[in-house]
Amino acid sequence: METAGRPQDAVVVAIDGPSGTGKSSTSRAVATKLGLRFLDTGAQYRAMTWWMLTNEVDVDDAAAVALASDKPVLVSGTDPLNPTITVDGVDASGPIRTQEVTAAVSAVSAVPEVRARLVELQRTACAESAAAGGIVVEGRDIGTTVLPDATLKVYLTASAQARAARRSGELKGVPGAGQMSVEATREALVRRDAADSGRKTSPLAKADDAIEVDTTELSLEQVIEAIVTLVDEKLKERTTG
Ligand SMILES: Nc1ncnc2c1ncn2[C@@H]1O[C@H](COP(=O)(O)OP(=O)(O)OP(=O)(O)O)[C@@H](O)[C@H]1O
Ligand SMILES: Nc1ccn([C@@H]2O[C@H](COP(=O)(O)O)[C@@H](O)[C@H]2O)c(=O)n1
C-alpha cells in the first residue's frame, strides 16, 4: 500500500517549530545518521523571497507576489552533508540568509499561491526520496499540511532567550547577516514567529500527533539522539504491528 505518494516502508520525519529551535541542525544530523535525505523548507521560502526582492516585486503587495510566484525556478539538493538551493540556476545559499530576506520572508510565505507552489515541490522531494529510504523535512507546517502521513512528527520548542542567544552567536561572521544584540535578535524572532503563527494559510502549528521536544536545556547532540530514538521506536512499532 502507498501513502501520500510514497512507498509505505520509506521513513518520513517531519520537524516543525518556531525560529531558532534547532530544526535545521537537528534535521541534518538525524538525516545523516539514518542515511535519509534532508529538506530545509525555510530555505525555499527564503529563496522565493530573495527572488521577489531581486526582481523588485513589492513583498507587501500580496497580489503582486502571487502573480510572480510561478516565475523563479527553485531547486533544492537534499544531501544532508551538502544541502543546496539554487534560484534560476544561481546558488542562493548565501543571499537567502541576509537580514533583508529574513525581514521580508514572513510576508511572502503568507501568500497562498507561494505556499501552493512550494508545497508541491516539497511533496515531490519527499516522493523522490523514497528510493533512498526516506527524508527528514523541516519547517513550520510539515506535520500539519505538507506531510500529514509522516512516520514521525516532532515539534521543537525552546525559550525565546535561548533561541536568541543561539541565533546571535550563529550570525557572527556571516557576510551580509549584520550584527544584532541578543535582545534585538530575540525581538525579531518573536515578531517573525507571531507573523508565521498568525497567517491564515498553513500557520506555524504543532500537529495533534506531533511529539513536542523542548530543547532549552538540551545540547544539540541530546536533541539529535532523542529524535533518532523516536524514529527507532516508530520503526519498531511498524514491524510489531
Ligand atoms: N540544542 C541546542 N543547543 C545549543 N545550540 C543549538 C541547539 N540546537 C541548535 N542550536 C544552534 O542554534 C542555532 C539555530 O539552529 P537552527 O538553525 O538549526 O534552528 P532553526 O530552528 O532551523 O532556525 P530557523 O527556523 O530560524 O531556520 C544554530 O547555531 C545551532 O547550531
Ligand atoms: N514550512 C515552512 C518553512 C518556512 N516558512 C517561512 O519561511 C521563513 C524562514 O524559515 P527559516 O526556517 O529559514 O527561518 C519562516 O519564518 C516562515 O515565514 C514557512 O512559512 N513554512
Image: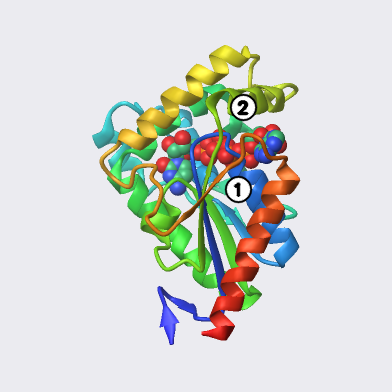
Q: Which quadrant of the rendered structure holds the N terminus?
A: bottom left
Q: For residue 146, which numbered disc appears in the image?
A: none
Nearer to the camera, 38 or 22: 22
Nearer to the camera, 159 or 18: 159
Ligand 2 within 8 A of label 1's CB? no
Q: Is residue 177 above or below residue 197?
A: above
Tell me how many marks there are: 2
Nearer to the camera, 50 or 185: 185
Label 1 sits on a secondary structure element that is: strand
> Hey, what amino acid is under mark 1?
Ile
Horizontal side, residue 46 vs residue 149: left or right: right
Q: Quadrant of residue 177?
A: top right
Q: Quadrant of residue 169?
A: top right
Q: For residue 85, which numbered disc appears in the image?
A: 1
Horizontal and vertical percent position of residue 52: 42, 34
Q: Is residue 181 visible?
A: yes
Q: Is residue 59 above or below residue 15?
A: above
Mark whose residue sits in front, 2 or 1: 2
Horizontal and vertical percent position of residue 55: 44, 32
Horizontal and vertical percent position of residue 43: 55, 43
Ligand 1 within 8 A of label 2's CB? yes
Q: For residue 162, which numbered disc appears in the image?
A: 2
